[in-house]
Amino acid sequence: MITEHALPPVRAGQEEGFEAAFTQAKLIISAMQGFEGLTLSRCLERPHTYLLIVQWARLEDHTVGFRESPQYQEWRTLLHPLYDPFVVRLVG
């Protein structure tokens, strides 16, 4: 199993919009081959920052299967405009 950790920094005042958009985005990612689960938590000390943890069966399910797919473009359209700055991401 591969675990992806992301720290999406959401634009101030856009937290509710991000959480609503993430509800839609979760439907996209959960339908991808190799997706095994995710959690999203809001940081108490930095309320504009979230912790996203996604489990994938294989690295390629994340890097090729998801990130190179048309579904990833939908994910980007929903979420990326709400980030400031862009997401810090680690995969291991």
Image: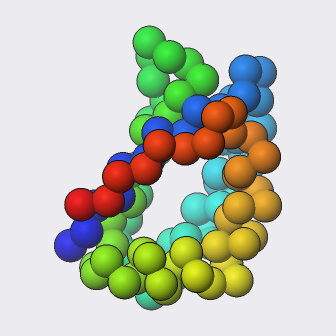
Residue 68 figure quarter? bottom right
Please provide percent x and percent y for residue 75: 68, 65
- Count of numbered circles in the view: 0
**Residue appearing at x 64%, y 73% in the figure:** 72
Image quarter in which the N terminus is found: bottom left
**Residue appearing at x 55%, y 75% in the figure:** 67
* Residue 65 visible, this angle: yes
**Residue appearing at x 61%, y 42% in the figure:** 86
Image quarter in which the C terminus is found: bottom left
**Residue found at the far top of this picture:** 45
Please provide percent x and percent y for residue 29: 55, 71
Residue 15 figure quarter? top right
* Residue 31 visible, this angle: no
Please provide percent x and percent y for residue 58: 28, 81
Please provide percent x and percent y for residue 26: 58, 62
Q: Is residue 43 above or below residue 38?
A: above
Q: Tell me: 74 left or right of 30.
A: right
Q: Is residue 59 above or below residue 46?
A: below
Camera-side residue: 23 or 85? Answer: 85
